[in-house]
Image: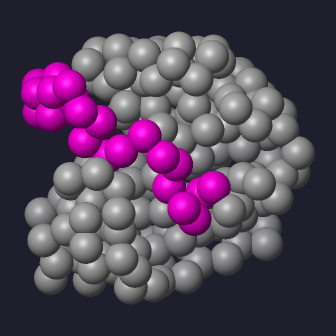
Amino acid sequence: MNSFWNERFAVKEYVYGTEPNQFYKEELEKLKPGKILFPAEGEGRNAVFAAILGWDVTAFDSSIEGKKKAEKLANTRGINIQYFINNYENIQFEPESFDCLVLIYAHMHPLKRNEYHKKLTSFLKPGGKLILEGFSKDQINNSTGGPRDINMLFSEQELRNDFENLTHLSIEEADIILKEGQFHDGEASVIRVVGTR
C-alpha cells in the first residue's frame, strides 16, 4: 500500500488539491486552537490549514512522498507542522494528549477499522473533538474517489460502534459535489461525523 501512495503522491501537482476539505474547514473554525492530530494526512492540505489558524499540528502517513509535499506546502505558507512516517498499527502518542482528531478520507482495512478508530480516539483529551469525513457505502456506485472495496467504505452503524465512547455524536450521510483535485472530483456519497471525547 505504501508503494501505491508513494506513486500517487510523487507527481508534481497536489492530486487532492492544496485547499482544506470544506466540511472539516467549517467545523475547525468553530474551535479554539490547541493540539491537533491528522492520521493519513497525505499531501498536507488539511494540516497546513490548521497550522495557519494557530493549531499545534501533528500528522502522520505511511507515504514519504506525501510527507515531502506536505512539508513543501507548509514552507510555502510560512508555517510549521510535525509530520511522521508511520501507520495506524504502530503509531503511538500519549493518551489524552490532543484537543482535536481529524480523519479526512482515512479509510482502512475493514477488520482493523474499529480497533484503529478506538486507538486514535484514545489520544483525545476529555472534551476533545473528532472531525471525520469519508465515503459512505453508496460511494461504490460512483467513480469519484475512494476504495473500490465496499467493506472499506463507511456505514453509520459501523461508525456509531467505533466511536461509542464519544458524546454529542453527530453522523450524517450526504450526496455532495467534491472538488478536491483530480481524484476527488464530482458527485460523491459521503458520511460526516463530529463527536466529543
Give the residue at x 53% y 41%: 46
Residue 69: x percent and y percent?
A: 35, 21
Give the residue at x 29% y 15%: 64
Residue 185: x percent and y percent?
A: 25, 65
| Figure quadrant of the N terminus | top left
Q: Is residue 182 visible?
A: yes
Residue 166 located left or right of residue 185: right
Question: What is the number of callouts on the image?
Answer: 0
Q: Is residue 17 magenta?
A: yes
Above or below: residue 119 compared with residue 20: above
Residue 145: x percent and y percent?
A: 21, 62
| Figure quadrant of the C terminus | bottom right
**97 or 69: nearer the viewer:** 69
**164 or 171: nearer the viewer:** 171
Above or below: residue 5 compared with residue 192: above
Question: From which residue to which does the magenta span run?
Answer: 1-25
Image quadrant assignment for residue 17:
top left
Residue 123 located left or right of residue 147: right
